[in-house]
Image: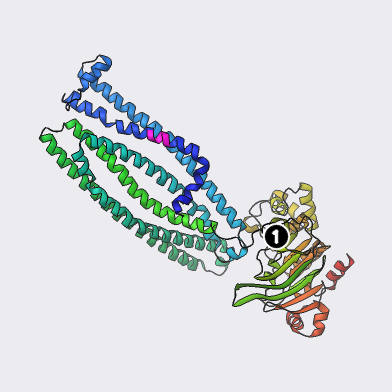
Amino acid sequence: MSIYLRTLRYFRAYTGQTIVAIVLMAAGIGFNLLAPWPVKYLIDGVLQNKTAPGVAGSREVIAHWLGWTNSYGAALVLSAVLLLITVLAGLVNLFSNALFIKVGLKALLHLRTQIYTCLQALPLQFHDARRSSDSSFRVAYDSQSIQTIYNKGFTTIFGAIVTLVGAFSIMLKMNWQLTLVSLVVVPPLFWAIRHYGDRIRSESTTIQERESDLLATTQEGLGAIRMVQAFGRESFEVSQFIRHATRSLEANFRLQMTSMRSALVVTTLIALGTSAMYYEGSVQVLAGNLSLGDLTVFVAYLATLYQPIQQLTYTAWALEGAAAGAQRCFEVLDREEETKDTPGAIDIPSAKGEISFSGVVFHYDPKAPVLAGIDLAIAPGETVAFVGGTGAGKSTLISLVPRFYDPSAGVVRLDGHDLKSLKKASLRAQIGMVLQDTLLFSSSIRENIAYGREGATEAEIIEAAKRAQAYDFIMAQPQGFDTPVGERGGHLSVGQRQRLGIARAFLKNAPILLLDEPTSALDPSTEKAIMETIADLMKGRTTLIITHRLSTIHHLGRVVLLENGRIAEQGTGPQLLALNGSYARLYRAAGHEPETSINSKIQSS
C-alpha cells in the first residue's frame, strides 16, 4: 500500500473536522478568485472609463448599486469591496488552516502513541538489535512526517486543484489564446517534479539516518559523562560528535542544493510562461482586442494559476521527504511481535511457582545456539542458582521465564502450562525481578518503589521500604520519599539503588523471583547486607539467581552449572565441590569461603 494512503488512515477519525475545513478552504479560494475583478472595474470603468464589449463600466455599475455617478465615489466603493474580499478570504483561511493544523497534530499524537506502544510491546530481541536513540528518533522526529503529509500534502493539493480549476476556467472563458500560451510550461514543470522528487526522498532518508547517528553519539557521550571525564576522553568524544555532525551537515547541504536547483528550474519555467503571456497580451492590447483592465485581471489569474502549480511542485518534494520519515515509522509498526499472546491465551491468577524447561533451544543465529537442549525441573519454592562463564547462557535462560524471549525449540512451563498459552501480562504479574543495575526513573523515591505494583497504597510502599532495609536512608534524604533520585538514580549510591529495587520486588509480592547478578557491583560489606535482605525476599518464593560470586550461593539450594548453553553439572554446592569438576575449579579460582550464616537464615525460615 502507498505510504501516503496508509498515512491518511490516521485521519479517518477526524473526517467531520476535515470536511468543515475543506468547505472553508473552498470558500476562501472563491474569495481569492473574486479579488481581481474590483481592480478591473477600477481600471477600465473609473480610471479609463473603457470597457470590454458587453461589459458595463464601473461608474454605471456603482450608479446602479448606490445611485452614485461620481468617479471618486466609485473608486472608494471598489477599493472597499477589494478590502472586504481580502479580509473575508483571510478570516476564512485562518479558520480553515487552524482546523487542518489541529487535525494534523491529533494524528501526530495518535501515531507517536502507536509507535511508542509498539516499541513497549516488542521483545528484547528487537531492542537488543538496535540503538535506543534510533527508536527515540523515530518517535520524536520521524513521526512528524504524518503532519507534513496531511498539512503540506493533502490540504495543499486539494486547495491547489480547486484553485487551478477555478482559475483555468475563468482564464479560458476570458481569452483562450492567452490561456494556452500560459500552459506551455506545464509539461516541463511536471517533468521537474518527477525528476527531483526521487532524489529528494533518497537524500531525506540519508539525512534522517545521519541525524539518528548524531543523536546516538550525543546520548552515549552525555550518558557516560562520568567515565568520559574519569578517563580524560573529552576531546575524543568531541571529535566523535564533530564527525557525525559533519556527516549530517554534508547530507543536509546536498538536499538543500538539490532543492535550490529544482527551485531555479521551476522559477525559470514560470518566468518563461509569464513572459510569453505578457508578450501575447501586449500584442492583443495594442491591436485593440483586449482592454488594459482585462489584461490586468488575466495577469492576476495567471499568478493564481502558477502559484498552485508551484505549490504542487514544492509539495511533491516535501512529500517525498516526509515519506522517508513515514516509512521509518511503519518499519516499527510492521515489526512482528515475536512473543505476542497466542489466540486463546489464558490468565494465571496465582502461580504456585513450578517451572520446567523441556528440550529448550534458543539462538539468534541457527549456526551458533545460545542454549542447546536444556531440561530442568524446578519445584515450587525452590532456589536454583545458575553459574558458569560469560556467554554460557545464564541470563538468556532466565529471560525465557517472563517471555522476554521465546525458545527457538522446546517448551518452558509454569505450573504445567506452556508459557505461550498464558497471557504475557498475567505471566509477568507472577514474577518479581532484582537486576545487577537497578533501573530507576528520574522521579521520586516513592514513585520508583510504587513502580513495583500499580495502585499500591502509601502504607504498602513504606512497608516495602522497611522490609528492604531502605526506610532509614530514605528518611535521611532531604524530602524523604518525595526526594528525586536523579537520572537513572544518579543521586543515590549503588547499594541504595539496589535496596529500592528490592523494595519494588517486596511490593510486587510475586511467587517467582528472578535475580540477575544482584550483588556483583557491591563491596563485600554492602553485599553481605543486601544478601541478607534478599534472603528475606526469597522466603516462600521460587527463586532463580545468577551470580559469579559462588560464595553467596554455595549453600542456598541447587546450583546449575552451564557450559556452552548446556547443563554441565547440577546439585548442591558441597555436592558439586565434591565432584571436583568444573564447579570446583570455578569455586577454587574465586577463592571465596561459603557464607553459612545466610544458609542458616534461609533454612530457619
Left or right of residue 70, residue 555 in this image: right
Residue corresponding to mark 1: 497
Q: Position of residue 417 (x, y in %)?
A: 75, 63
Q: Residue at x 41, y 33 (%)?
A: 24
Q: Position of residue 294 (x, y in %)?
A: 20, 32
What's the magenta bit mostly, secondary-structure-wise? helix
Q: Is residue 228 above or below residue 258?
A: below
Q: How many marks?
A: 1
Q: Position of residue 486 (x, y in %)?
A: 63, 55
Find numbered disc 1 in the image and state the secondary structure of the residue it sits on: helix
| Name of the residue lying farthest toward the left | 287
Specify how the rendered protein is coloured: rainbow
Left or right of residue 524, residue 75 in this image: left
Badge 1: residue crowd in 10 Å (few <14, some 14–19, many ≥20)? many
Q: Quadrant of residue 37?
A: top left
Q: Is residue 489 above or below residue 181?
A: below
Please give the range of residues in magenta: 22-26
**Which residue type carries mark 1?**
Arg
Q: Quadrant of residue 399?
A: bottom right
**Front position in the image: 306 or 448:** 306
| Name of the residue lying farthest toward the front | 344
Q: Residue at x 45, y 50 (%)?
A: 5
**Front position in the image: 563 or 554:** 563
Q: Quadrant of residue 244?
A: bottom left
Q: Residue at x 73, y 48 (%)?
A: 455
Figure quadrant of the C terminus: bottom right
Q: Is residue 65 above or below residue 193?
A: above
Q: Is residue 579 above or below residue 120?
A: below
